[in-house]
Image (tube, rainbow, N blue to C red):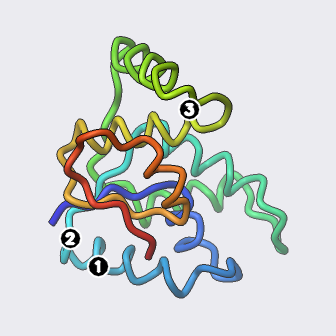
Amino acid sequence: MTVFFDTSVLVAALVKPHPMHSQAINWLKRAKSHNLDMIISSRTLAELYAVLTTLPVSPKITPEMAWRLISENIEGIATIISLSSSEYIATIKHLRDLGLSGGIIYDALAFKASIKSNADKLVTFNVSDFKRLLTDEKIQILSP
């Protein structure tokens, strides 16, 4: 089974004081034990670093700590999917066609990468946001 991980799940899995940690960590454990194939987008990887280094937690997650979390839990475990410039344009046009604006673009880019990867499932804490993007894709969107 191939599972695309949204940033929301990765942050919760990596940060123990996160209120959703216990729900998310099991997905990460399954990926690390090779019970599922973990997929993320390159944009998700950048967002993960940005969120980790700006989270209001104590102690603060330093850039070095964020890199270590990514290195130990993502690098070498996840398949990282990148989008081409034409796929970015197609995603923006898709949002235009759906009449959607604003920050949904970031979920739309992750969604596009999940479709490109042929993932079976997309795991996120933002299920309703991702479901707005569905047309006829055959990917299951679920919360941990």
Could you tell me which residue is drawn at 49 percent across and 45 percent down? 45
User: What amino acid is found at the position of numbered circle 1 in the picture?
Assistant: Arg
| Cβ–Cβ under 8 Å for marks 2 and 1 | yes
Check disc 2 and give the amino acid type.
Leu
Residue sitting at x 62%, y 58%:
66
Q: Which residue is mark 3?
A: 105
Q: CA distance from mark 2 to mark 1?
A: 6 Å
Q: Which mark is residue 30?
A: 1
Q: Is residue 61 left or right of residue 99?
A: right
Between the C-alphas of marks 3 and 1, the distance is 29 Å
Which numbered disc covers residue 39?
none
Identify which residue, 126 or 133, lies in the foreground: 133
Q: Secondary structure at mark 2?
A: loop
Q: Which residue is mark 2?
A: 36
In the drawing, does residue 87 fall left or right of residue 144? left
Looking at the image, residue 113 lies above or below residue 91:
below
Residue at (23, 36) in percent of width and height: 116
Q: Amino acid at mark 3?
A: Ile
On screen, 7 above or below 110?
below
- Visible residue check, residue 61: yes
Asked if the residues shown at circle 3 and circle 1 are in contact, with their CB atoms under 8 angstroms apart, the answer is no
Q: Quadrant of residue 105?
A: top right
Give the camera-side residue of 133 and 120. Answer: 133
Say if residue 77 shows up in the picture. no
